[in-house]
Image (cartoon, grey):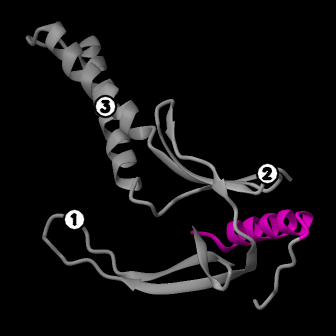
Amino acid sequence: MDQFTYIRQNDGTRSPRLLGQILLASGIFVILVPLFVDLDTDPLKLALVGGGAVLFGIILSSIKSRIVFDFERKLFKESHSILWFKSGEWEPLPEIDHAELIHHSFRTSYTPNGITPTLNGQVTLYKIVLLANGAKFLVLDFNREKDAVVALEKIKSALEAMHIRISENE
């Protein structure tokens, strides 16, 4: 196994991506409505408004954040991308002493504002904690335990292939 890619889920890009999908759908809607309904609005204005929404929607929907591990070259990269532009530099991968899966449960609470629904409930995140030199190196968050277990096994097998012994205290 040469590389492992972790796509971040809780990095603050979820809301812009959702806004981008909403803009994309509304832009397509604005462009398609004149085909079915006779409107007095200038078609150029509709095309500009719909096209602008589609353009901003594509840009916002394409925002991604990830961490790539290259175990063969002993490097890792935290990268961000918008459309085809990617940022991030390769850094040396420190010697990882410990990798474990932990469950982090907490109760969500939102303040009611009369507009949005208030969803309160128990949430569990599954975190893979990587320790290097006795300190926290990286924490990878997953929403499903199955995904976290698969990722932990991939990381451990790649680290063992690099001849790094991982202590197991799970």
Q: Which picture quadrant has residue 153?
A: bottom right
Looking at the picture, how far across and down is residue 17, in whole percent?
39, 46
Label 2 sits on what residue type?
Arg
**Closer to the eye: label 1 or 3:** 3
Residue that carries the numbered disc 2 in the rendered image: 73
Label 1 sits on what residue type?
Thr
Write the start and end of the magenta stretch as one range: 142-163
Q: Residue 135: which disc?
A: none
Q: Residue 116: which disc?
A: 1
Spatial CA distance of label 1 from label 3 is 25 Å
Q: Residue 56: which disc?
A: 3
**Closer to the eye: label 3 or 2:** 2
Looking at the picture, how far across and down is residue 7, in whole percent?
59, 54
Decide whether residue 126 is among the magenta residues: no
Label 3 sits on what residue type?
Phe
Residues under numbered marks 1 and 3 in contact, where contact means CB atoms less than 8 Å apart = no
